[in-house]
Amino acid sequence: MKQITGDMAALAVKKRPQDSNKGTFGRLLCICGSYGMAGAAMLCAGAALRCGAGLVDVALPESIYPVVAARLPEAIYTIYNEDDFSPVLRSLKKADACVLGCGLTMQHPEFVLRVLRECRVPLVLDADGLNCIAADPDVLDSLDCPAVLTPHPGEMARLQGTTVHQVQVDREGTARRFAVRHHVCLVLKGSGTVVASPEGKVRRNPTGNPGMARGGSGDLLAGMIGAFLAQGVAPALAACAAVYLHGLAGDQCAQRLSQQAMLPCDMLQELPKIFLQIEKSRG
């Protein structure tokens, strides 16, 4: 199996023209977070901002807006109450890409399914977005947009109706078969994260370490993929680049703070250093 390389990841980091404006780099809608899960929204949107998206619109329930907005002044916000999701659907029509599911909880699966039906831009489906379709993953077959799914082994097992052990003993085959069957890009997270394209091409990620195995790491990754998609990067390349850079941030963070003590928010602080290295390498 081929590996993702640093050169490949750098292809997703586009040079920023002198006459750029925020519209040049896309509008990403993050439908993330719920009461008790504000951190997921902050990590996802924070990673998207650090990865260069021109405008990050965070769709939040009213209950957690003050907490998230205080931490992320660079984002804009779509506020909704849980009796009326129409503001989110209006924002979806303005977006260039969407991340759906980080910290969303399973309280409103019908809303997730409606977003899937109405989405026309590249989509990252993560966490509770995946759990909402686990009973019927064939809903993916009727999507009218490119999609990147980011399950960990437990979520992958639920999507397939199998066990985690069955997923783990054949990670490459599991990812490839699902990606081809449902014509999606599949990011199977874990040690040696595997990225499978709808055409059946599979690459393994060489970066990352066990210090990343904690809540919040996946929210960062979803936001990173979404940011690249919003900037017009093809789904398979966006997924590969984000996975590689996410792992690299984790490795640099572990060297600085230890695998034991590092946190996803610490990984977020490594991203500027990584992008600076990429920009310098271009001269």
Image (spheres, rainbow, N blue to C red):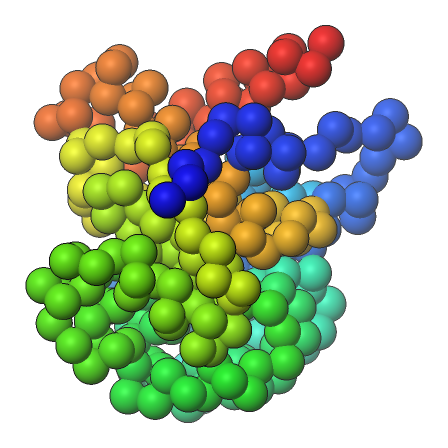
Q: Residue furthest front?
A: 1
Q: Nearer the viewer, residue 123 or 53?
A: 123
As displayed, is residue 83 above or below residue 156? Answer: below
- The quadrant the C terminus occupies is top right
Query: Which residue occupies 29% across, 32% down?
Result: 208
Q: Is residue 129 visible?
A: yes
Q: Is residue 52 left or right of residue 106?
A: right
Q: Position of residue 90 (x, y in %)?
A: 67, 77
Q: Nearer the viewer, residue 130 or 193?
A: 193
Q: Nearer the viewer, residue 241 or 21?
A: 241
Res 37 quadrant in image? bottom left
Q: Position of residue 195 (x, y in %)?
A: 41, 52
- The quadrant the N terminus occupies is top left
Query: Which residue occupies 80% across, 44% down?
Result: 24
Badge count: 0
Query: Which residue occupies 26% across, 13% down?
Result: 256
Res 121 quadrant in image? bottom right
Res 199 quadrant in image? bottom right
Q: Is residue 168 left or right of residue 182?
A: left
Q: Position of residue 267 (x, y in %)?
A: 35, 30
Q: Is residue 124 visible?
A: no
